[in-house]
Amino acid sequence: MKDSLLAVARALAFVVLALALCGVIFEFAGYSAPEMFQSIADGAFLNPGAWEGSLRWAMPLFITATGVIISFRSGYFNVGAQGQFYIGAIATTFVVDFLNGYPAALVVPLCFIAGVAGGAVWALWPGLLRVRSGADEVITTLMGNFIAGLILIYVTGGVLKDPSGTGQVMASRPVAAAYRISSEVGLSPTIVGAAVVVGVLMWVLVNRTAFGVLAGLAGRNSTMVVWQGARMSRLGIAGFVLGGALAGLAGTIEVLGPNGRLVSGFLPAHGFTAILIALVAGLSISGAAIVSVFFGGLASASLYLPVLAGLPAAAIDIINAAIALFITARAAPGLGWLTARRRMIRGA
Amino acid sequence: MEEFVIATLRYGTPLVYVTMAGVLAQRAGVWNLGLEGLMIIGCCAAVLGLVQTGSLLFGLVLAVALCVLASALLWFVVERLRANPIIAGLGLTGLGLGGTDLAVQAIYGSQATVNAPYGLPRLGPYFGDFGVLSVLVAAMPFVVFGLWALLRRTRFGLQLSASGEHPFAARSVGVSPARMRLIALCLGGVLCALGGAELALGSLTIFAYGMTAGRGFMAFSAVIFGAGHPIGSAAAALFFAIVGAIGIRAQLAFGDRVPNDLLLALPYLATVLGIWISARFRGGAKAASSFGELRDY
């Protein structure tokens, strides 16, 4: 308990440091930093109804983040959540587009299966390249993100294009009302239920099963796991596929839920934010549930800023990036007592 | 054919400069995934400096200064705060992309691109068809061979390589690996600034949000593909450039018959292929198992 409290204090200290850096950048660019932070806080949590928006963004982010946690815990840096999210969303849209007219009880479950499978496939190939050949997964998954982004542009401008759409935004046909799992508010029982089920299942998997324990060890000491008789390659592939499947599930939820259609280049920061949530939470599922709300608030504020406060949404990207820059720090000059847990991610 | 060579050099030159920055960092033992962010800072600072003051020199100096500053920040975070270089590098990349977006919006409002009045000096008619290329293209081979000579033929270069390969050995002869990493990252910052300036002002004269489009990550892959050797990595970067140029040619040749968006994915696919091939030949698993953490011993 004391350990985890220290870990939280440490994470908070570095988040504050990151926000200070952001303040400097805002002032340097000619914005008032206090005003910027005030507007962000308003948009995320303080304005009436802001909480609803934050929770709407937190749900899919939490689901993707649990996938990232599983991948990172099993010892691999799968940073391809964005691509896996896109492929899941694309697969879902294909199903909903081609089965249009069939009963919802058939189409909606198939959509979920397609999204999960799509995300899993997009994580499987970097996983195989990593485990079979040792090809660095950081680069292959990053390249996978770019390729998935181009596939998204291709399908929204081609096969899945909405013929009645304007030329400015390429998007698929809107999902028929019968198949939608939520309105634009995005807090329907289905979505909240999915997030809760995923959270509970993943918590059990990580903390109460042999797989979770072995995967957690694999991320820190692979030699020991091999000596225990487990197969690193199996754990690794399972971690990749599960991570991809969960990112794909988030893609399905976005398409059938609040988005209601597949839009070219939608939510470009989703995967990166999910990785941040996983790291800020110290790769703990229960921690990620809380941290998701914070980052969901930031995501919600990035829509609020340009429209209502007249400030650029890039401010949110900068805050996320600055947190990424500092969050894995293990030492702080003069803050030695905060680094009780020396290595959050396995060291050399 | 000449057109194809020109297209390859246009695509490849910024990539080679940034790849050299990656080689320096890799040699010193830092996995620099911030290259993408440094490159976009270089693009943006060069164009904004030029547009705001009308002086190309000021633009270049601003680009170099900001890239070196950002590199030093990355060094502080990974060396002094012991952050994970991969995540910190991705953070720096995000900071570069977001920061340049913010800077453009702060100065020009919601405008997406900034046009510069003119670009880098060209080689001129003396070089025939190649005269349209910028002077940085001609300087590229000298930079690559210069870096090779620095790393393999000088005491400083060997000390720098030792700091990455065997920090304990470096320390035992009185070399500070931490300082070597700072120097390597800052020199890399200069190269990233030049690469960014070449991308924005070499053949185009424009800054657009996200114009680096993953080139920094490609450069990082070229470093891995080329095993951290300056000439091998530069060759890998040019290979990616050839694939990119083939994609551009194919768009012109086939028009609407092949999907353009999928042709744009060719360099990314080539990068995956390159990483896979180099891992198969060298057993790359060892390199990544440390998650890119800095080595002290």
Image: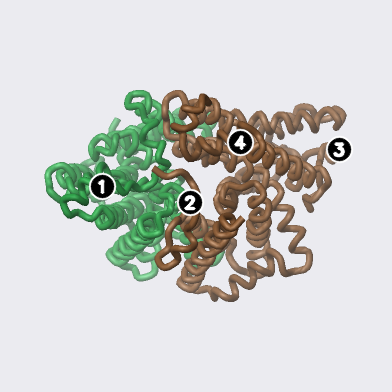
Three-letter code for the amino acid on which mark 3 is drawn? Ala
Three-letter code for the amino acid on which mark 1 is drawn? Pro
Spatial CA distance of label 2 from label 4 is 38 Å
Q: Crowding at label 1, few (<14), some or many (≥20) Cα neighbours within 10 Å?
A: many
Of residues B148 and B116, which is closer to you in this image?
B148
Tell me whether marks 2 and 4 sit on the same chain: no
Q: Residue at x 71, y 49 (%)?
A: A59
Of residues B163 and B182, which is closer to you in this image?
B163
Query: Mark 4 highlights which residue?
Result: A212
Q: Are marks 1 and 4 in contact (CB under 8 Å)?
A: no
Query: Mark 3 highlights which residue?
Result: A178
Output the chain of dot 4: A
Which of discs 3 and 1 lies nearer the camera? The answer is: 1
Output the chain of dot 1: B
Spatial CA distance of label 2 from label 1 is 36 Å
Tell me whether marks 3 and 4 sit on the same chain: yes
Q: In which quadrant will I find the C terminus of chain A?
A: top left
Question: SS for tag 2?
Answer: loop
Question: SS for tag 4?
Answer: helix
Query: Mark 1 highlights which residue?
Result: B167
Q: Colour of chain B?
A: green
Image x and y of residue B124, in percent? 22, 49
Question: SS for tag 3?
Answer: helix
Q: Colour of chain A?
A: brown
Of residues B221 and A13, which is closer to you in this image?
A13
Q: Does A233 sit above or below residue B207?
A: above
Q: Residue at x 52, y 61 (%)?
A: A10
Three-letter code for the amino acid on which mark 4 is drawn? Gly
Query: Mark 2 highlights which residue?
Result: B210
